[in-house]
Amino acid sequence: MAERGHSLLRLNLMEKRMATLNDYRERPHWSFSALNQFVNICSLQYYFQRIARLPQAFTPVSLSFGTAFHRCCEWIQLTRRDGTMPKRDESADLFQTIWERQTREDQRLRFDEDQTIESCGRQGRDMIGCLVDGLDPAEEVVSVSEAFAVPLVDASGESLETPMIGEIDTVVQKAGQKTLVDWKTSGSRWSKQKPHLDLQPTVFLYGYQHQHGETPGFRFDVIVKNKTPVLEQHQTTRTKDQFDRMVHLVKRVERMIANEAWLPSEQSFYCGGCGYQEACRAWHRQQTKTISIGGPDVRKAA
Amino acid sequence: MLKAIVSYSKKIPVPNSDFSSQGFSLSLETEIPDRDPALIQAKLQETFELVKASVESELEKHGAASASNAPAAAKPEPARTEQASNKQIKFLTDLCQQKGIALSQLNQQIRQQFGVGGLYDLTRKQASELLDSLNGKQRKAA
């Protein structure tokens, strides 16, 4: 069963010959995750990961689990796109296969309390089952894992040299209306405000609009990790003013990076799962200037 | 005393296994006593080459056994070295902004003219051709 899905994905990539996110990553770029990491998570973590390129002490289980979940969702959508509604058990089995492989690939995997590979596997199977149960047969799948790269242009018409890149999980269409969908897993229910404040819809809708000249909607499909998982769907949209604000934010962040303005986000919710805790604890004792090189993105910080 | 952190990482697909990749990375911290920019650059280059060679050597050892079993589809694609640079694309974008052409229109033109997805899929040569064609339109308009 899993083999069929693998073949489908390979066929899809070969048939379309479209640029992938990895292609776009070869050039200096911005992404939602980089921007969000700097602005909302921790600018010092951004430095450790993307400038100093330090190896992480461990891989949090949530990251591995999310990757496996995402890959399974990808297969589900490709199957739908090819005209077949995936079955619950088949999808859950595929998750199990991907999850077990993911745990072998990721080094120094760190589990939360009371979690094991087996318990996460069971939870993931239930969550995938919940997602399959919630699929809307009236929805047409337009694309899966669609990469984009677009210039960032501010309100005055000035463009930034570094583009924004990203990969849209899936684009669906119903009654003539297109919607970009992003899959999430979450330990708790989302607040009503979160989808409207999140940077991801802003970045992705900006990318899609400039790539295609269309203005679709955006939806988060969130599977909440309850004992019995729940599917939440959060719709949102963005305005031109929000796009302008996002570009302005990138410009400010670029200036902060040029000035090495990174700070630890003390007492952050994210600290527990951060793989740079040791480097962070030693940060204020490091009185050195840093020069990092590597690949085409040669950066020299004074 | 300057401190340099030199890193090199590379990911390759796992043969016969979709959805999988294996990553190899190495970071080396070194101190640079010199203040002369040319000497600093030379030291950095030397260190980077050392780190890169070490990773590639490990890859060779690790990959030699599995490469023969890899299906054709799993071979990594050649690097897109001829892609238009960010500077070139910024130049194109700014020109379009001045001429009042929307980015989506420009991408549409690129799809029709070159059969690629958009601005950042252009090669250097295609970007030059597009620039010529945009400037040609400008001359006609003038």
Image (cartoon, coloured by chain):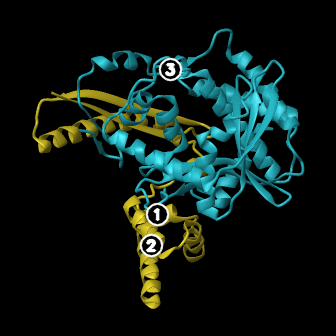
User: Do the residues under discs 3 and 2 have CB atoms within 8 angstroms?
Assistant: no
CA gap, disc 3 to disc 2?
A: 49 Å
Element type where label 3 sits in the image:
loop
Instruction: Say what amino acid the circle numbered 3 marks.
Output: Phe
The residue lying toward the viewer, choosing from A292 and A12, is A292
Q: Position of residue B44 (x, y in %)?
A: 22, 38
Relative height, residue B131 to residue B11 (above, below): below
Element type where label 1 sits in the image:
loop
Instruction: Select label 3 or label 1 by which is in front.
Output: 1
Dividing the picture into quarters, in which one does residue A119 lie? top right
Chain in yellow (letter) = B
User: Do the residues under discs 2 and 1 have CB atoms within 8 angstroms?
Assistant: yes
Residue at 76 percent of width and 31 percent of height: A223
Relative height, residue B124 to residue A89 (above, below): below
Chain in cyan (letter) = A
Q: Which residue is mark 2?
A: B98
Residue at 72 percent of width and 29 percent of height: A190
Instruction: Select label 3 or label 2 by which is in front.
Output: 2
Q: Which residue is mark 1?
A: A157
Q: Tag 1, which chain?
A: A
Instruction: Say what amino acid the circle numbered 2 marks.
Output: Gln
Q: Which residue is mark 3?
A: A58
CA gap, disc 3 to disc 1?
A: 43 Å
Residue at 68 percent of width and 62 percent of height: A214
Q: Tag 3, which chain?
A: A
Residue at 62 percent of width and 39 percent of height: A198
Answer with left or right where residue A109 lies relative to residue B26.
right
Dividing the picture into quarters, in which one does residue A212 lie? bottom right
